[in-house]
Amino acid sequence: MSTDSAPAAQEPDHPAIHAPPPGLPALFLAFARMSLAGFGGVLVFARHAIVDQHRWMTADEFNETFALCHFLPGPNIVNLSMVFGSRLRGIAGGVAAFTGLLLPPTLIMTVLAIIYARFGDVEVLRRILAGISCAAVGLLIAVVFRMMTPLLKRMDVVVLILMLGVFTAIGVFRWPLQAVLLIAIPLSIAVTYVMRRKVAA
Amino acid sequence: MNSQNPIWALISTFGLMSLFAVGGAAAAVPEMHRVAVDVHHWMTDKQFADAYAIAQLSPGPNVLIVTLIGYAVAGIPGALAATLAMCVPTALLAYYVSRLLNRPNQSRWPALIQAALVPLSIGLMAASALILAQSTDRTIAALLLTATVAVIASVTRVNPLWLLLAGGLLGFAGIV
């Protein structure tokens, strides 16, 4: 990944082309910034920073990296920081992104824990946080829509049906995650395999 | 077990839990509740609910609810121990799996599997958006705010932070 480190390869009007890989301090700062902006989840800001702002990955690369981290155990975005950082700069890059993501919010969270232990809850704070969380859901919907666009452009009907199926099973029917994935994962792998053979033939 | 050293109890609990938490932090919350409230009696039910709200609405990954649980158990060392135990093992696992999948002289299966997971992953994200919206958007005003933010963030490149700040202001004004 990211073998072309020549800065000359950058063309602003061509979104498929990578920016040069960032240094370790830049990685740390980028993840610290997206983490601190990430009220109600960091994914929105991670995608914004990595794909739109810095162009360190294309939309498809981001989808595939996130999907991998989504299906491995543990917090997705923490996994993503490690995998993403190490794909760009090796293990040191992974550690830089990981600490950037976790260090600042952990400090804030510790302060909040101390405040909470002293003061319990404050009504005004609750109202503000409620407003923020409404906006955060809107942002989540937007990021899902943006992640969907490469799939929509390709108009892969089977892939879209799979996506819709998982959404309906989990979101609408609230079926248990494990059962849904136990069926959906083999099905999706089989479909992808058949489609790629067709393209190759 | 290990009642004499709460730090060790935190590390073993969350280290183990993280390795079984497929589907992310949100999927592990019911298990965290069971362990922290029912099994170890580290917190009351209300304390746990408050910790969840604070973690949801604070900056940073939502998994940092474990920082709050750790603090309730053993102060600042507990907060650090719980956070690291929840995050380090799976990050290392992800690192090794990703390296395995991206070795250059490999069959096409890893790329194929990764591509096959994409639509499922997006479907899951869409489902959590729906579930979150159902619990957050209890009023028409809240629903409108969510919909407006969704449209603005989809069609423009405005920094998401401004939209969150606008939401906070509307909440402060008592509108949503």
Image (cartoon, coloured by chain):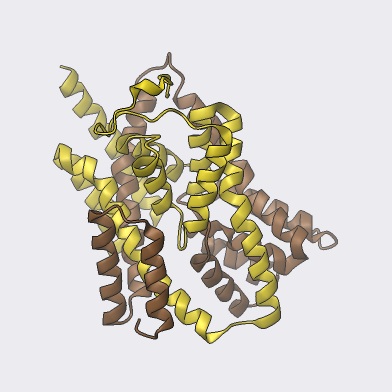
Chain colours: A yellow, B brown
The residue at the point 36 percent across, 29 percent down is A18
What x and y, as percent, mark residue B74? 77, 64
In this rendered view, identify the residue nearer to me: B170 or A183: B170
The residue at the point 48 percent across, 47 percent down is A76
Q: Is residue A134 above or below residue B28?
A: below
What x and y, as percent, mark residue B19? 58, 46
Of the 4 image quadrants, the one containing the C terminus of chain A is top left
Tag count in the figure?
0
Q: Which residue occupies the extreme right position in the image?
A: B4
Does residue A157 appear to the left or right of B38 in the view shown? left
Of the 4 image quadrants, the one containing the N terminus of chain A is top left
The residue at the point 68 percent across, 56 percent down is B82
Q: Is residue A131 above or below residue B14?
A: below
In this rendered view, identify the residue nearer to me: A15 or B58: A15
What x and y, as percent, mark residue B168? 42, 74
Please identify the quarter of the rendering in which residue B156 is found: bottom left
In this rendered view, identify the residue nearer to me: B145 or B89: B145
Q: Is residue A200 visible?
A: yes
Please identify the quarter of the rendering in which residue B46 is found: bottom right
Please identify the quarter of the rendering in which residue B160 is found: bottom left
The residue at the point 27 percent across, 32 percent down is A190
Q: Is residue B92 visible?
A: no
